[in-house]
Image: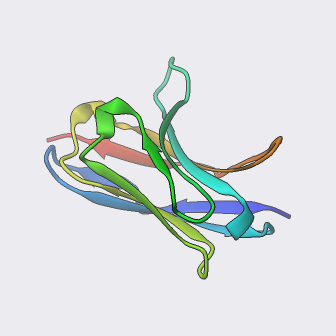
């Protein structure tokens, strides 16, 4: 059974930082590209950042470039999202995603709220 378990969300003031983690099980983690998505009520889920299997390639949505960093540790089956200089617009539920060919898996999501 595939499980992606996110952690690290919470409430932070504007300008602050949070670090999200996603621990994977039930898959050969090193064979999956990993991504972080986010969703706010009434809007489509959007890709925030993604990383290739060997960490050789990363991609970010323009709104987080220079502020967020995605990384992975294949030995720990974990992907991370370091979020700095957070803004109220970053408030959303953040989801971890594992992708290989036509196989997609999702975590349950973790709430990130940026507010003073």
Residue 27 placement, left or right of 7: right
Position of the C terminus, as image quadrant, is: top left
Q: Position of residue 51 (x, y in %)?
A: 53, 53
Which residue is found at the position 63% from the left and 73% from the top?
Answer: 77
> What x and y, as percent, mark residue 109?
56, 48
| Residue 14, above or below 24 | above
Name the image quarter holding residue 65: top left
Horizontal relation, residue 63 to residue 14: left or right: right
Residue occupying image coordinates x 65% and y 54%: 33
Q: Quadrant of residue 4?
A: bottom right
Residue 5, above or below 104: below
Left or right, 9 with reference to 30: left
Foreground pick, 14 / 84: 84
Identify the residue at horizontal 64%, vertical 52% (top origin). Answer: 107
Give the x, y percent position of residue 12.
Answer: 23, 51
The mark total stands at 0
> What residue lies at 60% left-to-right and 75% top-to-bottom?
74
Most extreme residue toward the bottom, as rendered? 75
Front-lying residue, 108 or 71:
71
In the picture as drawn, the residue positioned furthest to the top comes out as 42
Coloring scheme used: rainbow
Q: Nearer the viewer, residue 94 or 30?
A: 30
Q: Is 35 left or right of 112, judged from the image as shown?
A: right
**12 in relation to 14, above or below:** below
| Residue 89 % position (x, y) | 28, 30
Q: Nearer the viewer, residue 9 or 62?
A: 62
In the rendered view of the protein, which quadrant contains the N terminus? Answer: bottom right
């Amino acid at each position: 059974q595939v499980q992606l378990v996110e952690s690290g969300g919470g409430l932070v003031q504007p300008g602050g930082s949070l670090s999200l983690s996603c621990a994977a099980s039930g898959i050969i983690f090193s064979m999956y590209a990993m991504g972080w998505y986010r969703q706010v009520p009434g809007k489509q889920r959007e890709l925030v950042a993604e990383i290739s299997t060997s960490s050789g390639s990363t991609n970010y949505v323009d709104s987080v470039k220079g502020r967020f960093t995605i990384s992975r540790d294949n030995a720990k089956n974990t992907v991370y999202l370091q979020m700095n200089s957070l803004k109220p617009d970053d408030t959303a539920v953040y989801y971890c995603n594992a992708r290989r060919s036509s196989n997609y898996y999702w975590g349950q999501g973790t709430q990130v709220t940026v507010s003073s």
